[in-house]
Image (cartoon, rainbow, N blue to C red):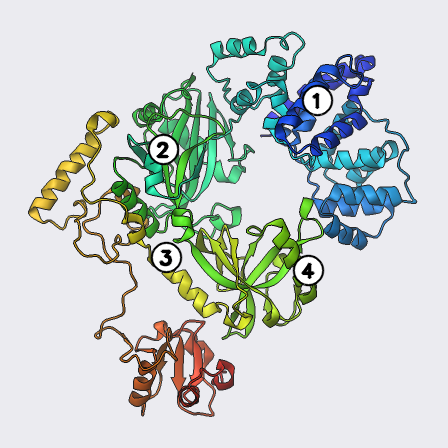
Amino acid sequence: MLLSRLTWQARFLTRLLCNKMASKGWHNEDNKLDTFRRICDEIAGESSYLKKAEKLQRFFEKGSSGKGFKGDTLLWVQFLIPAANQRVYNLQNKALIKLFSRIFNADQQQMHLDLEQDGDVSETLRRHFAASKKLKPQAQSKLYLQEVEEMLLKLVERTKEDEQTDLLQKLCSKATELDLRTFIRLVKHDLRINARARHILDAFGPDAYPTYQSSRDLVAIVEQFAGRENKKDASSAVKKAKKTNSSGIQVMTPISPMLASPCKSVEEAFKKSPTGLYSEIKYDGERVQIHKQGNDFKFFSRNLKPVVDHKIRDLKKYIPQAFPGGGEMILDSEIILVDTDTGALLPFGSLGAHKKQTFANAAVCLFVFDCILYDGEDLTQLPFRKRREILEQNIKPIKSHVQLSESEFLKTTRELATMTARVLHANLEGVVLKSPTSTYQPGKRNWLKVKKDYLFDGKMADTADLVVLGAWYGSGKKGGTLSIFLMGCYDAFGRLWKTVTKVHSGLDDATNAEVHESLIKLTERADANAIPSWLLCSKSLVPDVLAKDPMKMPVWEITGAEFTKSDAHTASGISIRFPRITRRRSDKSAKEANDLAHLEDLFEASKSNVNVDLLLANCSKDEKVLDSKTTPEKEKKLNGTQKKLKRSNTTGSDDEDGAPVPSKRKESKAIRSLSPSQKGLKDFFKPSKELKSVVKKEPKEEESVTQSTSSEGKLFEGLVAHFAMEKDSSKLMQQFSQHGGRCTTETRKADLVFYTSTNEPLDLEKLRTLYRRSCQHLNITWLQISLDTQSRQPYPLYAVMMK
């Protein structure tokens, strides 16, 4: 990483030196920072992406004078795509405010308040620069792009506050207020022009961006498509480049990864690929693109940034062993922490430097699922079937370190539905579907991904009704608007409100503005050092504003990919992954929202129940398997499995490898619970011997939880009670059951525990080992008065004393 950065910087320093030697060449209007700022403003003001590209194209042809562009095209393109250089300035908003408050002699707290309203730190700094009495901005811009580039390179190297302050002060002495705003936007890698690399490079023709996706080399792109000699015939440059490499791919230069688009049903998947699909488990880890050249490695993340060393350090030893004949190669893969004893895939987020240390006998495992280049040969134009064969023929898997992703060729919607249900039931993220004929297209979403929250318009997603506890001000166009929300629930046992998740998506601009106006009246400024007594919240999650009274705050339905665990949140560590607002529950008060006990039940239920009826509803049991001619040649393993399945059916074997038995019952069917810690990943692709029901059944009489014996009422519906009383409990238990409740002898299943009247406090530490934390410990009087009044009484009024 350091070597590549130094190489990249050396190229620029060489260019800058050459520019200084020919300073007359770049001291022109087209190289002025003010000209760059003006063009950025024009692009930002244009809503059409096509017209943005046309404006740039005209400028690069005619320049400021209208007689021809005389500026540095490469530098312009690099500035217009500031994130492409992957420079790290270590200057977040708080750090910038701190530095410039010194330079301008301004009130730091006031600058933070202004930033909340502006939502754009560059605009906040511009306004304070204009108002500064200590350092006045220049009346006319004097900076050139080459000078700005030199300052940016120096800023990368300066990590101490005094050094950064000195450099930024020198900048301000030469800059106008608008120059400073542009410079800060370059530092933030966001010019706020609403144009991505594609729209910028479209100014050089339709082939420029596709080539960039493969090579990520702006120098080569500009030379090919914007050079003086190549302007007339850019396509010939592309053809020339393709002679050496069919797609311009270069080892050690990151390639835009091929992506997957959401798939909402199994029927939709087969419409896009009627000849069958390869299905792979969607690993819940981190995507990594591996480049190997000789003994050198580079590892790039999904957003093409270098992967931190502690995550991939050991892989450098195992990859050459797993691919002994690989030579130069580029692999597409996922890394995930696995338990080396059981083979279990450890939770998302466990790859963190500190999290990894909490897992004994764990190792980072590389699951390879595609090959972009192998032994120096570009494979992007080969169909996926062939690329998969190359992987299978050349990999020597190393358990718990380098493994080939599991893949199965599916021919019917029923096969896909069954396998998807099995994967979801095992608490894995989902599946990725690939056409056997698809080529590797960098940056394109031509694969499909099936996840629980995508299916059936979100009917299988996890949801909870949570209370808005606070909010943060947004940035950009949402600056000055409360647009990120802290959601939480009430813990009746601890008598505290606790945090569950942050959410920022799901509201359109008009609704967000309406929500902002209502929340402003219900909230007050928060202080991380003075968290109110009603809230249990991590200091890092204290928002800009908090509720004055949480009982008066709105309730929203929050939907996400799944319930998950998070150390940052305080509601028993329960959180929601990829949350979004799906409904504002005006029909519910904060008192009626899901409390912690209910949230814990939802969490447990989400891990065990998958509604397979929805998945299998439209799949015919008699659906014909596709003709073998349309399937990949690699079917030996599958054919052998099919023969084995037939034997299992005829013998009535209970072997795990037996075929799914078509059921004549109409009830919901599902799969047995498979745990990655108990079975290898191959088990997810083996048909289970029989689909089992996942509808939550009422316990049988002999079970520890007794059913409600009467439909007399629903007063206690949904509650499970344990009676910790030696005498006179049978009649009360009967009454509790008659009114919708259920009784249990197993303490860990209880929502409520009843005690006879006593003045002696109970031992809290002892009870914690017997009951769930969310369980309510009540005097039996609660039940008697609730029955008399036919209304559930408040728990706190009848809570037993604890010591």
Mark 3 vs mark 4: give the one in front.
4
**Along the line of sight, the residue nearer the viewer: 78 or 22:** 78
Amino acid of disc 3: Lys
| Residue identifier under label 4 | 517
Quick one: label 2, few (<14), some, or many (20+) residues within 10 Å? some
**Label 2, label 1: how far apart the Cα atoms are:** 42 Å
**Label 4, label 1: how far apart the Cα atoms are:** 44 Å
Is residue 716 depicted above or below 208 in this figure? below
For the question of whether residue 139 can be seen, the reply is yes
Mark 3 vs mark 2: give the one in front.
2
Is residue 664 depicted above or below 302 in this figure? below
Under circle 3, the secondary element is helix
Q: Earlier in the sequence, mark 3 or mark 1?
A: 1
Is residue 746 depicted above or below 157 in this figure? below
**Label 3, label 2: how far apart the Cα atoms are:** 31 Å
Amino acid of disc 2: Lys
Amino acid of disc 1: Leu
**Label 3, label 1: how far apart the Cα atoms are:** 52 Å
**Label 2, label 4: how far apart the Cα atoms are:** 45 Å
Under circle 4, the secondary element is helix
Q: Residue furthest right?
A: 133
Mark 2 vs mark 1: give the one in front.
2
Quick one: label 1, few (<14), some, or many (20+) residues within 10 Å? some
Residue 703, picture quadrant: bottom left
x 34%, y 30%: residue: 435
Residue 607, disc: 3
Q: Earlier in the sequence, mark 4 or mark 1?
A: 1
Do the residues under discs 4 and 1 have CB atoms within 8 angstroms? no
| Residue identifier under label 2 | 272
In percent of width and height, residue 345 lies at 38, 47
